[in-house]
Image (cartoon, helix red, strand yellow):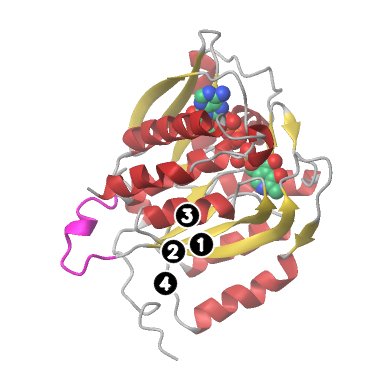
Amino acid sequence: MGNDSTNAPCRPARSADFEGNLMTNLYEREDAYIPRVAAIHDLCGYGKCSLGVAIPVLSAAGCDVCPVPTGLFSSHTAFPGWYMHDTTDILGDYLAAWAGIGVELDAVYSGFLGAPEQVDIIKQVWETYPKALRVVDPVMADHGKVYPTYTPELVEAMGTLANGADILTPNLTEAAIILGREWQGADVDEPTVREMILELRERGAKNVVLKGIEHGDGLIHNYVWGDAIDFTETTNAKLPYMLHGTGDVFASTLLAAVMAGSNLAEATAFAADFTADAMLISAKQPNFEDRGVSFEPLLGKVTALLG
Ligand SMILES: Nc1ncnc2c1ncn2[C@@H]1O[C@H](COP(=O)(O)OP(=O)(O)O)[C@@H](O)[C@H]1O
Ligand SMILES: Cc1ncc(COP(=O)(O)O)c(C=O)c1O
């Protein structure tokens, strides 16, 4: 069996060296190196989110995406009825088989998880691939409420995963949970945002993108701050509806931009604009609140990041 691609040399950058523009000049290299990203999320049959977003978005950015399904869902859990199959038991053998054929990784991008043991598995992946960039979207809650499949043990474990991230992308509810703060709505002032990001960084996250903040000015604010980037804010007009899966579209397009050479401030702005544009297209579709974020017609914008 040929596995030349899995034996290709790994990009020499180390997560510890991350300076916000890891991949600059990548596509100028003679061998046009294609970075490999493990996407550790659930697979949702209906109601686009998770792997259904990460695979096309990162592929459009020229990445080789290797999925690790943390669960199989009939739809996302905002629907009134859904089926879930927890994949925790297969993940050890699945990843051992990767190691057996010499798979190398440049980034490990995790999101929605099915059980606390999966956090240990991801930490193991980090150890197996110490050079890979660690991107943690600590998907577990929104609007002050924890998602129905998240047990207190899983929520606590997710907090420990957040501490090891090179790039952490919580919404306000998730940041509050990780920090043990009471959730006080999406309208949080800037000094509080700074305080929260600083606390997340003190716990170990190297760079934090805190998303979905409102200041009652009709805008959605995203903030990014970390070792690789000064405190930066991006704003977009707040659209008068919400869709499930925006967090996944945001985090996947942010990582796509980073892998294509953007720094974290550029990547945050790109992700926010892309998500808002996709929401505008979504609103033109029938049953758009059920269908999720219609990002497909915009994938060319992701590819355009490659120049
Ligand atoms: N109503 C909206 N109008 C404009 N942008 C939005 C809207 N909802 C979400 N977004 C964009 O998508 C990002 C992620 O969405 P959010 O709902 O905060 O994530 P999550 O699904 O993780 O809670 C936001 O930070 C914002 O940039
Ligand atoms: C199964 C599943 N995966 C992923 C998500 C993440 O969605 P979002 O991108 O809105 O955080 C959800 C949210 O309801 C979900 O139920």
Q: Nearer the viewer, mark 3 or mark 2?
A: 3
Residue occupied by mark 4: 104
Side of 37 relative to 145 (left or right): left
Give the Cα distance between marks 3 and 1: 23 Å
Vertical order, 146 against 122 (above or below): above
Instruction: Of the two numbered discs 4 and 2 on the same chain, state the one appearing first in sequence.
Output: 4
Tell me the number on the disc at residue 126: 1
Q: Are marks 4 and 3 in contact (CB under 8 Å)?
A: no
Q: Are marks 2 and 1 in contact (CB under 8 Å)?
A: yes
Question: Does 210 lie within the magenta span?
Answer: no
Tell me the number on the disc at residue 130: 2
- Badge 2 element: loop
Name the residue type under label 3.
Answer: Pro
Q: Residue at x 68, y 17 (%)?
A: 184
Instruction: Of the two numbered discs 3 and 1 on the same chain, state the one appearing first in sequence.
Output: 3
Q: Nearer the viewer, mark 4 or mark 2?
A: 4
